[in-house]
Image (spheres, rainbow, N blue to C red):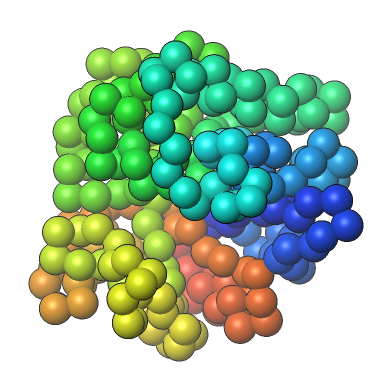
């Protein structure tokens, strides 16, 4: 079970997160590509940092929404989605090549990620964009109860999939993340976060907020380290997974 984290989300003189502290504890870095956060210098520094710690590098593209941090839905045609995906992936891979690194996967950010999981045609467009960019480039998407159908679609299109789950987010009975607007959507207690991480890693799923078992065989856990409590949780998850042989 690999840990992934959204990084490189600073912008100019504005700093977000604790990338230097988080990087040694994760396996996969989702690097912002300039549309919701980051800039060329931040991208370059984040790639170099990932290489230093042996962390896989993934592109983290989004809608073009710096003001809204990519969390606002924006209507696009399939052609526009394809173009914005290729533009951002290409920008990050250019920096990777210059550093002797290889881009390993793509993980859409924010509203783009949420929208594609609700809209099959958008998901197909995103998958096709990644497959057309490079045939061996993987796409990371949230694990849901429809994971078998998503895997079948990815095989049809020709894009490798990586299913991710969240250790610090609550799930509803349909296998979707509880909206952040609802109470209890985000776990803050380190013990709860570690227990959920271990449940995904060792049991292939998690219980919903109502106690219903959800079969969600994820391959990577998304963790957050943008504050001291989150960073402590990342360390605790890493230690727990190692102790469990994961």
Can you say whether 164 is above or below 115 in the image? below
Tell me the quarter of the picture where residue 121 sits.
top left
Residue 167 on image: x %, y %: 41, 68
Tell me the quarter of the picture where residue 193 sits.
bottom left
Tell me the quarter of the picture where residue 174 sits.
bottom left
Left or right of 154? Residue 46 is right
Number of numbered tags placed on the structure image: 0
Can you say whether 188 is above or below 245 in the image? below
Question: Which residue corresponds to the image point at 52% horizontal and 64% vertical from the top-left?
Answer: 223
- Look at the image and tell me in which quarter the N terminus lies: bottom left
Residue 66 on image: x %, y %: 65, 46
Residue 97 appears in view: yes
Residue 235 appears in view: no
Can you say whether 204 is above or below 139 in the image? below
- Look at the image and tell me in which quarter the C terminus lies: bottom left
Residue 149 on image: x %, y %: 17, 33
Can you say whether 123 is above or below 71 in the image? above
Left or right of 223? Residue 170 is left
Question: Which residue corresponds to the image point at 47% horizontal and 49% vertical from the top-left?
Answer: 72
* Of 73 and 217, the residue lying toward us: 73
Question: Which residue corresponds to the image point at 24% horizontal and 58% vertical from the top-left?
Answer: 176
Question: Which residue corresponds to the image point at 45% horizontal and 32% vertical from the top-left?
Answer: 139
Residue 131 on image: x %, y %: 45, 17
């Amino acid at each position: 079970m690999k840990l992934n984290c959204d990084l490189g989300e600073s912008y100019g003189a504005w700093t977000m997160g604790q990338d230097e502290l988080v990087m040694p504890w994760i396996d996969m870095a989702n690097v912002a590509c300039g549309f919701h956060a980051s800039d060329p210098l931040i991208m370059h520094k984040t790639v170099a940092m990932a290489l230093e710690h042996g962390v896989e590098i993934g592109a983290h593209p989004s809608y073009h929404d710096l003001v809204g941090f990519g969390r606002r839905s924006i209507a696009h045609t399939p052609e526009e989605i394809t173009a914005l995906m290729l533009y951002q992936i290409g920008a990050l891979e250019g920096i990777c090549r210059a550093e002797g690194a290889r881009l390993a996967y793509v993980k859409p950010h924010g509203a783009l990620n949420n929208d594609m999981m609700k809209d099959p045609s958008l998901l197909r467009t995103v998958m096709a964009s990644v497959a057309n960019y490079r045939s061996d480039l993987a796409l990371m998407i949230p694990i849901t109860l429809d994971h078998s159908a998503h895997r079948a679609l990815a095989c049809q299109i020709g894009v490798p999939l990586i299913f991710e789950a969240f250790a610090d987010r609550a799930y509803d009975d349909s296998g979707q993340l509880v909206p952040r607007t609802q109470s209890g959507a985000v776990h803050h207690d380190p013990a709860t976060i570690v227990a959920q991480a271990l449940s995904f890693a060792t049991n292939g799923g998690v219980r919903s907020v109502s106690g219903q078992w959800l079969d969600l065989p994820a391959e990577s856990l998304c963790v957050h380290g943008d504050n001291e409590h989150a960073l402590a949780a990342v360390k605790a998850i890493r230690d727990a997974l190692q102790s469990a042989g994961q």
